[in-house]
Amino acid sequence: MTAEIIDGKAFAAGLRARVGQAAGLFQSVANRAAGLAVVLVGEDPASAVYVRSKGKATLEAGMASFEHRLPAGTPQEELVALVHRLNADPAVDGILVQLPLPPHIDENAIIAAIDPDKDVDGFHPINAGRLATGLPGFVPCTPLGCLMLLKDRLGDLSGLDAVVIGRSNIVGKPMAQLLIRESCTVTVAHSRTRDLPALVRRADIVVAAVGRPEMVKGDWIKPGATVIDVGINRVPAAEPGKTRLVGDVDFAGASQLAGAITPVPGGVGPMTIAVLLRNALVAAHRHAGVELTERL
Ligand code: NAD
């Protein structure tokens, strides 16, 4: 079998176009643009690239982007004070503090300072609790993007066996919660799991979020399974001095057996920003008391 390639780039482009349309409608009803504030502390080059692309995508979707860049030495109290100002700002519907933060800042304290109803990253414990208890809230962007790709490909997920590899608060745990909500039978594997290949061999759905290049081997995949590869790993390329991106799954091997698989790059990666824009627009509608008519 040769797997269908799940084109996350195309799906994300479609979602961004729908968000853009809905953002235009929002503006005409609310008499203001939906607004997303992004906070970057320090000069981490990868974070700076993410923040720039999030700002650009926000403007492209017809929303207002508020960027706050603070020096690496910013005291925690100053960052908390900024978050409180953004919480109170009526033009700001969503707040994202780019992680990781410098080591002197307690990330949990900053996440907890964000108004849960502006927490478009879905990292606040209140939103994690809402997800776990089935209440409406904000769901972290990457796992929600994975779920959208899965539902687009498989429709009803009810009764399927799913293995999520990785138990981070950002990807693995919320992914497992989302799959439970869809009535999958979910196994969460992690660094202490015994016999990962045996678990993966049983799974109709495999979501790999580990951060280890090609650790999930092709021959672990159950024939016909759907494989979602969240990993982004930079490895040396064949050409000396060059690098390339690979996922957590051996793509060449797995695509011989899987029914469908996301590539890296071009699979899950583009979904994260698209879902962030979606979450920000949902936040704007709730904040302004405007009904969201478009299904996002
Ligand atoms: P993390 O480091 O917080 O978590 C990794 C998880 O993998 C841990 O729960 C750990 O228990 C598990 N793990 C480690 N070794 C293992 C092993 N040998 N077997 C099974 N499990 C093992 O990472 P994260 O933030 O969840 O990110 C995971 C990957 O996803 C990274 O490559 C990251 O770059 C990528 N990522 C991509 C996006 C995106 O596409 N937009 C977003 C977030 C993360």
Image: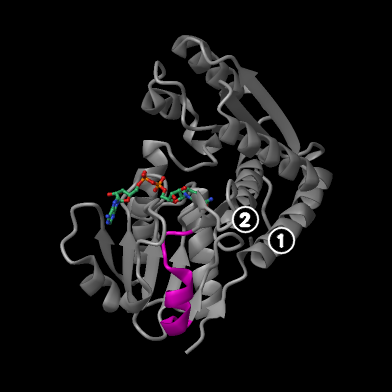
Mark 1 crowd level (few <14, some 14–19, many ≥20, 10 Å Cα): some
- On the image, the x and y values in percent for residue 272 come to 57, 51
Q: Is residue 221 left or right of residue 74?
A: left
Amino acid beneath label 2: Pro
Q: Which residue is mark 2?
A: 270
Residue 68, horizontal then vertical, whole percent: 65, 22
Residue 156 drawn at (x, y percent): 45, 79
As drawn, 210 above or below 8: above
Q: Is residue 276 left or right of residue 202?
A: right
| Residue 165 appears in view | yes
Inter-mark Cα distance, 2 to 1: 8 Å
**For marks 2 and 1 on the same chain, the one whose residue lies earlier in the sequence:** 1
Of tags 2 and 1, the one toward the viewer is 2
Residue 169 vertical position relative to residue 72 in the rendered view, above or below:
below
Could you classify mark 2 by the number of other residues whose Cα lies within 10 Å: few (under 14), some (14-19), or many (20 or more)? some
Answer whether residue 62 is visible to the viewer in this image.
no
- The residue positioned 71% from the left and 64% from the top of the image is 14
Mark 1: which amino acid?
A: Ala
Give the extent of the magenta segment.
Answer: 247-259
Farthest residue in the front direction? 240
Q: Is mark 2 within 8 Å of ligand 1?
A: no
Q: Who is closer to the viewer here, 133 or 141?
A: 141
Closer-to-camera residue (28/70):
70
Residue at the spot x=46%, y=66% of the render?
228
Residue under circle 1? 13
- Residue located 77% across and 53% down the image: 20
Helix, strand or loop under label 1: helix
Picture quadrant where residue 108 is located: top left
Colour basis: one colour
Which x, y percent locates residue 279? 59, 48
Q: Is residue 148 above or below residue 92?
A: below
Q: Secondary structure at mark 2?
A: helix
